[in-house]
Image (cartoon, coloured by chain):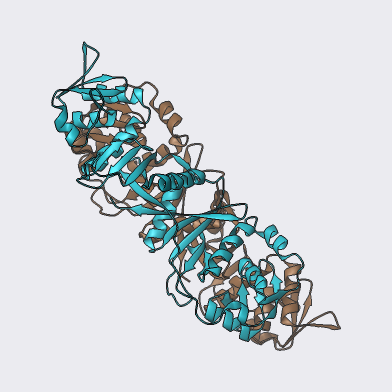
Chain colours: A cyan, B brown
Amino acid sequence: MQGELSGGKVVVAGSEAGILAKGYGRKKDRLELSLEEAAFLFETGKISRIKEGEERELNLEEFLKRALDISPEFELRYLVYRDLKERGYVVQPGGVDFWLYPRGAKPGEKPARYFIRILSERGFLSLKELDALLILARNMRKEPIIAVVDEESDVTYYEVKEAKFEFVEKGEGKAEEIGKAKATLLGDRVVLWDTDLAKNLHINNFYGKLTKEKRLLLSLVEAAYLMKKNVLEIDTGQFIEYASSIESDFMDKYVVYEYLREKGLIIKTGFKFGSHFRVYKAANQKHSSYLIHVLPEEHVFSMPELARAVRLAHGVKKRMIFARTFNQRIRYVDVGRMKL
Amino acid sequence: MQGELSGGKVVVAGSEAGILAKGYGRKKDRLELSLEEAAFLFETGKISRIKEGEERELNLEEFLKRALDISPEFELRYLVYRDLKERGYVVQPGGVDFWLYPRGAKPGEKPARYFIRILSERGFLSLKELDALLILARNMRKEPIIAVVDEESDVTYYEVKEAKFEFVEKGEGKAEEIGKAKATLLGDRVVLWDTDLAKNLHINNFYGKLTKEKRLLLSLVEAAYLMKKNVLEIDTGQFIEYASSIESDFMDKYVVYEYLREKGLIIKTGFKFGSHFRVYKAANQKHSSYLIHVLPEEHVFSMPELARAVRLAHGVKKRMIFARTFNQRIRYVDVGRMKL
């Protein structure tokens, strides 16, 4: 089988039907292969020769260099294409970067299940782009995958989903029915001195840290929520303003905190895991199920930053969720490692 | 036992000898307790009353508020102090923040082993400060600990050390003795076409990624090192300049790469772990032993960023090492979680 490089495509003459059936190329008035498809078939010996123009025959090295001249993204795309083909997937250039079909599927017979966005280890991805991938996915009824090519030419795949929070129904002891007591603002936390209320809040709803002396040390978000629920009274005038002066992202964190507490989830600091929050499905759960990191709308991830967060969450069997806040509304994006 | 708050200290009258012997306070012409010591003794009932001036007696809440007025860092310091006391350590205010003695030791009899630097979850620590802690430690013959107080009022301890790299002696097959071949620069990586050299470099020294077709895909740092070692020839004039145009921190990464390769260590991308490099003690090691993240001299860590990096490394049984480069020299700082 021979091909001719022309107009950024490789046109194949002869025996087109066979390779078309195997999921390569597209049929217009003649069979055209993308640069990645052609490079793969050339490198694996299925295409024996590629010409450019009437005279010039390209060897593999020359073809790869030409492809890179034509498309600066070719090299990354080709590494991902090869990786997916070698894993037995049917993959077609198109969509965001590629369409991915289930193993053994034939394009045209079954729809693609995923679309793939390709990035280099050195690339950047904004939270807005992540969100845009989700909107696109919903409209196209596909699932998005991010493929990151590292320096070792290995590809790591990440699934991107709208976060779904599961929770166990809240037991007895709703905060608002417990009682009410005075508390003291002490620097960047709040101390509740009423030992009965302290024990109740901590044991039944996992608020704060209970000291040996049965005083409850509450974080600023916890205190703000309990004030709203009429459980705490703190004789500081402008609590929100004060808290915001200590934590510039206090309101963003608070909005997330309130949303999840209202659902019956238990939400505590995720500091030890490098995130703002860790979230339990209920107060009696031994391990938290989600890590949440609250980010400003305009945040841009470096790929190692994303890799580090997701890998850590994966290692401790939690979902990594990025909360993007804007105008006190929130969108939750769940990014996970994907074994293809 | 009673105390009097005066000049930012609590002066104790009566039975001083007993508490001095237990490691509290300092004896000048009279026994003085730091605010943290006094708060702890007051909260645990060892001090029954604290007065301020002749007339005014403070309850615990009032004392804590006054202490915070006097020292804005009091609350964080007190949380760390309490935590260490409850773990059975002898701790004394002083040094950077506190001195820490082995359990059961008496200050004055044995020297402190550690000094502690206290930060809040919301704090920042520059790479330069980390480095300064190491210099201080060397001069004082102590070991530095970073204590981070999180929103839940829990304290996480990190040990900071100068990184020590262990390595297994290099086997046969030094890169420079293997041969020499031409390679092609392809975008942000390099392809070596000579299949014998490719196998040799990959199998014996774990360079690059070997494709099914026995071509070797090398990263830019690997290629630069092998060019220097006279193993590769790449017909691109200014390779370093080209590489630096793709990766702005190429030279910093390269300096680290060369340093470790010259020691006989094997160094590969650490992307999957969110770091620049993972490092093996030898080519035949199954798991890498170190993660290295290369940072500019002026880098400033947020505490969650540090926590995430160290926790991840800990979870995969590697040491987290931050390489700080300046004028093409490098300092390696090893930060690890510490169970006290």
Q: In this orientation, which residue lies closer to the viewer: B153 or B134? A: B153
The quadrant holding residue B302 is bottom right
Figure check: A235 above or below A142: below
Q: Looking at this view, is B224 or B109 the one in front?
A: B224
- Farthest right residue in view: B55
What percent of the width, then of the height, locates residue B179? 21, 30
The spot of residue B201 in percent (x, y) is 23, 38
Q: Is residue B235 left or right of residue A282?
A: left
Decide which of B40, A311 is in the foreground and name it: A311
When the figure is inspected, residue B207 is found, relative to residue A193, above or below; the finding is: above
Q: Residue at 34% across / 54% down in the picture?
A: B289
- In this view, the residue in front, A40 or A161, is A161
**Is B9 located above or below residue B204 in the figure?**
below
Residue ID at (36%, 53%): A337
Indicate the quadrant containing the N terminus of chain A: top left, top right, bottom left or bottom right.
top left
Q: Is residue B213 visible?
A: no
Q: Quadrant of residue A11?
A: top left
Q: Is any atom of residue A33 visible in this view?
A: yes
- Decide if residue A254 is on the left or right side of residue B263: right
User: Residue A290's image quarter?
Assistant: bottom left
Name the residue at 33% across, 41% down.
B262
Q: Position of residue B138 (x, y in %)?
A: 52, 57
